[in-house]
Amino acid sequence: MDNRLGDIEVFLAAARAGSFAAAAKELRLTPSAVSRSVARLEARLGVVLLRRTTRSLALTVEGETYRERMARLVADMAEVESGLGRETQTPRGTLRVNASVPFGTQCLLPLLPGFSARYPHVLVDLALSDALVDLVEERADIAIRIGPLRDTRLRAKKLGHSKMLLVASPSYLARYGTPLTPDDLDTHRCLQFSFRRSVDGWPFRLGQRVVHRVVESCFLGNSGDVVRLMAVAGGGIARLSRFHVAGDLQGGRLVEVLAAYNPGDGEDIHALYSARDRLAPRVRALLDYLDEALILPG
């Protein structure tokens, strides 16, 4: 079996010790084994690295150049391995996270200062996008997804659940009136998403039944934030997750409508990560921190 690294380490020991016998003692090998290892390395490189004399070894010019470069390489390898070992105790390194714009701005960003204070050796690289990304292609460690999961190659950790509700701005309701039943939506301006949803229409509870009612759209947005901002601006009625509009409800920029017909459905929120047997400590650290610190509005 080719043992190039072993031959290099034997050569470095011989160059350092100045003799095969001393190198053999340091490495717990026989002098003949050390000699064969160095000869194998020289044959592979096609150059003479060591000049043998009866009492000692001397490095050739090529040997000195090779020793300097290989010594740095072996030292770098040792540093990398040592760093990985330290990470098993202390999370460190770059943590790449991908999340939707609404969740990132409303829920994740407010928590990251606390996470960074607790784990100062972890550099968070956060990308916010409402487009689904491939974790491998985007080199993301964690992707936070809202709604049904589709990628079975990934492991998922549930972070919470957020209910859906209909909202509109006070200015819109003052202009168009407040709908009292789902049928009233026929005369209202409804804001929807431009991408296809898993179920067409908005669900409503009518007695013991939940029915999906198709509504006419006056506006289509390609993200939750676009639809939310349109609702805040008085553009119409939107159906969004509570976590997404909690601040607007509290601030009076939006109010809930048709609450009596809300079926109580919602969207699960998951953190997705590669299906590996062992998670990197920096990944475990964020997942555990979100478990502790993330509180979604009820």
Image: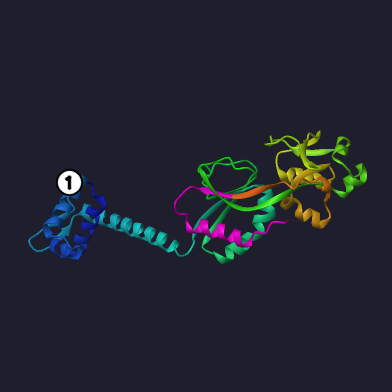
Residue 18 seen in the current view: no
- At 11% across and 56% down in the image, what residue appears? 32
- Answer with left or right where residue 180 lies relative to residue 126: right
- At 14% across and 52% down in the image, what residue appears? 36
Looking at this view, is 170 or 211 the one in front? Answer: 211
- Above or below for 205 versus 86: above
- At 63% across and 50% down in the image, what residue appears? 269
Looking at this view, is 254 or 152 the one in front? Answer: 152
293 within the magenta span? yes
- Answer with left or right where residue 162 lies relative to residue 85: right
Image location of residue 238, percent across then percent down? 79, 43
Image location of residue 19, percent across then percent down? 14, 62
- Answer with left or right where residue 100 lies relative to residue 139: right
Start and end of the magenta stretch? 271-297
Q: How is the image coloured?
A: rainbow
Mark 1 lies on residue:
43
Q: Amino acid at mark 1?
A: Ala
Image location of residue 263, percent across then percent down? 76, 45
Element under label 1? helix
- Above or below for 239 versus 294: above
Q: Residue furthest front?
A: 208
Looking at this view, is 165 or 40 the one in front? Answer: 165
